[in-house]
Image: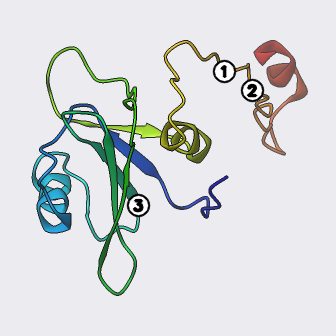
Amino acid sequence: MLSLPPSVRLFVATQPVDGRKGPDSLMALVRDVLRHDPLSGHLFIFFTMRRDRVRIVYWDRTGIAMWTKRLERGRFRPTFSEDGALVAQSIEAAELALIVEGIDLANARRRARWEPRRAVPRNAPAKLFLAAK
């Protein structure tokens, strides 16, 4: 399991990229096409056109870092957008860990999550709170 601080977000590109692109070219895509700050410390995930490689680029306070995984057999099964536009879709660290392990998430189902109730302001009348339920 990946252990990332909650402040780090993960963005996956919704279209494959040229597998020859290096960290500088991928960070240029982050800045110019995806419209994100490449120096934010967030992770940006790209799959190659053959879908046998995944590249993760990020700024680690001293420079651009790139992590690559190549599958010897098989293909990654990322969900790409139908419209062909390259945008960044936010995912969670658990999803990235499964994708990197080669698990197809197409038929995976996420269970409903618990969400806290909305807090009631201290000076609000009780009848407003009861009506909001």
Mark positioned earlier in the residue sequence (1 or 3): 3
Q: x, y percentage for residue 69?
A: 39, 52
Which one is nearer the viewer's eye here, 49 or 35?
49
Q: Residue at x 12, y 46 (%)?
A: 33
Q: Residue furthest front?
A: 73
Instruction: Name the kind of residue labelled 3 in the image.
Output: His
Q: Earlier in the sequence, mark 2 or mark 3?
A: 3
Disc 1 marks a residue whose amino acid type is Arg
- For mark 2, what is the residue? 113
- Which part of the image, by quadrant, shows the C terminus? top right
**Quick one: label 3, few (<14), some, or many (20+) residues within 10 Å?**
some
Q: Which mark is residue 110?
A: 1
Farthest bottom residue in view: 62
CB atoms of marks 1 and 3 within 8 Å: no
Q: Does residue 119 appear left or right of residue 39 in this picture? A: right
Q: Residue tagged by mark 3?
A: 42
